[in-house]
Image: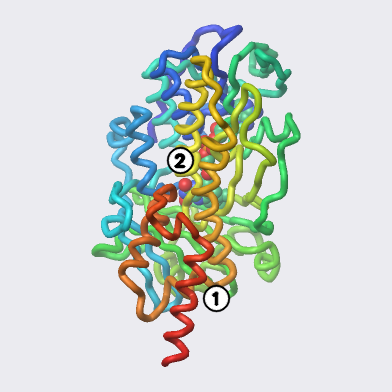
Amino acid sequence: MQDRLESPANALPSSVDVAVIGGGPAGSSAAALLRKKGHAVAVFEAQRFPRFVIGESLLAHCMDHLDEAGMLDAVKERAYLVKGGALFLRGAERSDFDFADQFTKGWSWTWQVPRADFDLTLANAAYRQGVPIFYEQKVTALDVGPPHTLTMSGAAGEHRLTARWVIDASGYGRVLPRLLGLDTPSSLPPRKALFSHVTGDRRPSGPDENRIWICMHPGGAWIWIIPFSDGVTSVGVVADLAFFERYAGDDEAVLRAALAEEPNARDRLRDAKLLWAPRILESFSASVTRMSGPGYVLVGNATEFLDPVFSSGVTLALESANRAAKLVDRALAGESPDWARDYEAYMGVGIDAFRTFVEGWYSGEFPRVLFAPNPSPAIRRQITSVLAGYVWDQANPFVREPERKLRQVLNIIAREEAAG
Ligand code: FAD
């Protein structure tokens, strides 16, 4: 892991055009895009990087955004493990999706990334493009303007600055949703993730070697297995809260017991050694009443977070950051962008495509499609494009009318089953 934190020793500014709260993928990429447009932008990040965050499996569409934000070459240098698709497993059944064979024209690969290193790489790339990043500055208050006044606290005490625009990229910190009362419950029920990094993963040889595995646990959970280039593998179990209550022992015992009950994970991970005690994230799904308002916009996980099963988080973070940065640029130039249409409704298209897949996953309907005995190659290509993150391609029926298309495919499967 690299530990070279590139950050300015300069004094905190007293005013900026755009203040970005949080230096994860959403914050660093939004700031880089605005800097390219010539705006005085600065990032205020509560922690010191590198820092751990979960969310290690990217989708192919991330590559478009990393490229546009001028970060792709810096990430390439890190030589992360290439991800060319995703493999779903249910006992002996397998359903493999290859990004090279998809409906939408786009990237056919991406990476699996340890996020501490990846996020540091993005932040350093933004810094090299002229974005000042102030670490260990926790934003604590906002006095609504214009201009807005942000209060932050760091080792040297409290600091206030004014900003014409505030971009909230605080992820799980949810700074503006809390300060402005924008939080609203997710449409998805509470679920829990228990996860760690391991060594000793017996990776398959051949084309599956790098694949992320998503294993369906017979007890209603699912398991992720995400190999990295340094030999470490990320492993996690996700389920409703009741699933975990039937296991005894500490978190490691619960994680090992759950992994041992799923045959694919059991075979691969029988010699696995945990690198740290498992971490828990509970009730991670979240939503907001609005994603933008006068002089502010929320991006990434500070908006809506659905569920980890299709690895959509970083893709939605980068897409929203890209979209928001372009609209803030227009607003700073004196235009009046239509935020409801061009930001909220636009982001809703991609979020709703993933929502249909996530709800279908937990209802059992999506696995019926995944493991259908006679899959249509055309339908699988359309699904692959959603799994690759191309969820704004209106030519794809799973984007245009996700719910209707899923029902249609389920009806075909039901008819085929009835016909024997
Ligand atoms: P973050 O990466 O969370 O960055 C936010 C930053 O804001 C942090 O560095 C934080 O320190 C900072 N911050 C917080 N509060 C403040 C404050 N008050 N002041 C200043 N700074 C602040 N996504 C994927 O794409 N692939 C996956 O495989 C995947 N797996 C997941 C597994 C689980 C169990 C969960 C729960 C999520 C997963 N995700 C995954 C989602 C992923 O974690 C997020 O979508 C992603 O990290 C969002 O990026 P972001 O930039 O919005 O926020």
Q: Is mark 2 within 8 Å of ligand 1?
A: yes
At label 2, which amino acid type do we have? Answer: Arg
The answer to whether residue 36 is visible is: yes
User: Who is closer to the viewer here, 258 or 151?
Assistant: 151
* Residue at image coords 58%, 63%: 359
Residue found 39% across the figure and 56% down from its top: 396
Residue at which label 1 appears: 218
Question: Label 2 belongs to which residue?
Answer: 115
Q: Is residue 267 above or below residue 7?
A: below
Q: Is residue 276 visible?
A: no
Residue 289 versus residue 37 in the image, above or below:
below
Looking at the image, residue 403 lies above or below residue 183: below
Q: Horizontal and vertical percent for residue 347? A: 52, 42
Label 2 residue SS: helix
Of callouts 1 and 2, the N-terminal one: 2
- Residue 164 lies, in percent from the top left, at 60, 15
- Left or right, 267 with respect to 287, comes to left
Q: Quadrant of ligand 1?
A: top right
Query: Horizontal placement of 201 versus 190: left or right?
Result: left
**The image quarter in which residue 242 lies:** bottom right
